């Protein structure tokens, strides 16, 4: 395909994606609203929509950056263990302090605990691992997988010793859901993500060069090890913020990043990131619309994403094997 035709097709795809995303957002926000209770409906739906858009930006953007750093399109940032650590934190809080404690009942305090613990793990542990392994991202990925298994095993051990009533109360916080979002944690999450993007703005501008590989990037003057270490930490922190905000959404990043690469066959990460974020917004808003108006709140949107993401992952895996 000629460059002019490729640019035209990507422009059309991006415009179509914007249209679909805005349509799903408006459909979720205003469809099936009783005029008598319009203000009340908006007070419920507006925070949910804002949380969905924030989560989409964090997860979709971080997943695309992560795949570029690893140079593999079938991996997700959940391999760094943030999702498993989130589940372990909430389980430990309920196990040691009880479901009625302030750390479990206060959304802002629970969000702060999640961010502090996951931020320490992301900043200290992964930076130390990166330095010890000489900047080898595959070792970081391997150790992240081991830590994820460790966190899951520890959480499983605590739940077996936990009081059944406490465990029942805990389950609500372990499943990603946009039905009972708390608007109080939205502003801190947005501010943290904005600060993260600002601090990493120069590193993010080098993603096109990092995608060429280590040797080529170094030859072009990119401080490879420092840039990759900062971006890897940023990815872990962005996933930590999104997970603390809504709960674990393991396969969302895999879906958004790969669909963006298929829709936009380009090396430019500004276009890929925009596409990935828009796809994430469309999936979450469309999925939550189905949850509320088709499934009648019987199934959280994370279940649809997990099933669809698992099937899509198998498709990508089989396609890569055939190649």
Image (tube, rainbow, N blue to C red):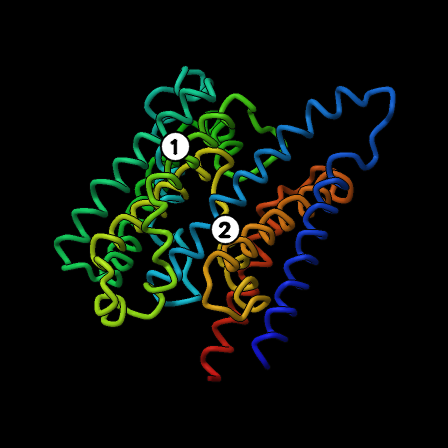
Which residue lies at the image location 49% right of the left edge and 32% below the top edge? 173
Q: Give the image quarter of residue 155.
A: top left
Query: Which of the 4 image quarters holds residue 264?
Result: bottom right
The residue that mark 2 highlights is 60
Residue 20 shown left or right of residue 174 in the figure? right
Camera-side residue: 12 or 283? 12
Give the numbered dot on residue 91.
1
Residue in front for this viewpoint, 9 or 164: 9
Callout 1: SS: helix
Residue visible at 27% across and 66% down in the picture: 217
Residue 16's disc is none
Expressed as whole percent of the image width and height from the top left, the position of residue 224 reads 23, 59
Q: Secondary structure at mark 2?
A: helix
- In percent of width and height, residue 277 lies at 55, 50
Is 3 in front, or is 152? 3
Does residue 280 lie above or below 109 as drawn?
below
Q: Position of residue 154 (x, y in %)?
A: 30, 41
Marked residue nearer the N-terminal end (2 or 1): 2
Q: Quadrant of the N terminus?
A: bottom right
Give the image quarter of residue 201: top left
Q: Nearer the viewer, residue 127 or 314?
A: 127
> Residue drawn at (31%, 55%), measured in percent from left and top?
145
> What distance separates the C-alpha of mark 2 from that of mark 1?
27 Å
Q: Residue furthest front?
A: 4
Q: Residue furthest bottom?
A: 323
Q: Nearer the viewer, mark 2 or mark 1?
A: 2
Q: Position of residue 307 (x, y in %)?
A: 58, 56
Determine the residue positioned at 33% across, 60% down: 69
Instruction: Establish if 97 lies above or below 117.
Output: above
Along the horizontal axis of the image, is 125 left or right of 62?
Answer: left
Label 2 crowding class (10 Å Cα cut-off): few <14, some 14-19, many 20+? many
- The answer to whether mark 2 and mark 1 are in CB contact below 8 A is no
């Amino acid at each position: 395909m000629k460059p002019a035709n490729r640019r035209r097709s990507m422009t059309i795809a991006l415009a179509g994606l914007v249209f679909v995303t805005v349509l799903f957002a408006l459909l979720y926000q205003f469809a099936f609203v009783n005029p008598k209770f319009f203000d009340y409906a908006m007070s419920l739906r507006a925070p949910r929509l804002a949380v969905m858009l924030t989560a989409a930006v964090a997860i979709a953007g971080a997943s695309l950056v992560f795949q570029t750093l690893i140079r593999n399109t079938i991996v997700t940032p959940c391999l760094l263990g943030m999702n498993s650590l989130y589940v372990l934190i909430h389980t430990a809080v309920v196990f040691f302090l009880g479901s009625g404690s302030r750390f479990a009942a206060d959304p802002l305090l629970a969000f702060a605990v999640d961010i502090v613990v996951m931020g320490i793990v992301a900043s200290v542990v992964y930076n130390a691992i990166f330095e010890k392994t000489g900047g080898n991202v595959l070792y970081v990925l391997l150790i992240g997988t081991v830590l994820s298994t460790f966190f899951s095993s520890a959480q499983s051990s605590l739940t077996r010793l936990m009081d059944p009533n406490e465990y029942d109360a805990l389950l609500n916080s372990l499943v990603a859901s946009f039905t009972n979002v708390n608007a109080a944690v939205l502003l801190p999450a947005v501010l943290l993500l904005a600060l993260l993007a600002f601090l990493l703005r120069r590193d993010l501008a080098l993603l096109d060069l990092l995608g060429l590989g280590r040797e080529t990037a170094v030859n072009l003057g990119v401080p490879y090890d420092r840039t990759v270490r900062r971006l890897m930490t940023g990815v872990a922190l962005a996933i930590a913020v999104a997970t603390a905000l809504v709960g674990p959404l393991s396969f969302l990043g895999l879906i958004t990043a790969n669909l963006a690469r298929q829709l936009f066959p380009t090396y430019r990460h500004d276009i890929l990131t925009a596409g990935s974020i828009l796809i994430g917004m469309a999936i979450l808003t469309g999925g939550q619309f189905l949850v509320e108006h088709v499934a009648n709140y019987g199934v959280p949107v994370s279940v649809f994403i997990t099933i669809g993401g698992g099937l899509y992952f198998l498709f990508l895996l089989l396609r890569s094997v055939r190649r």
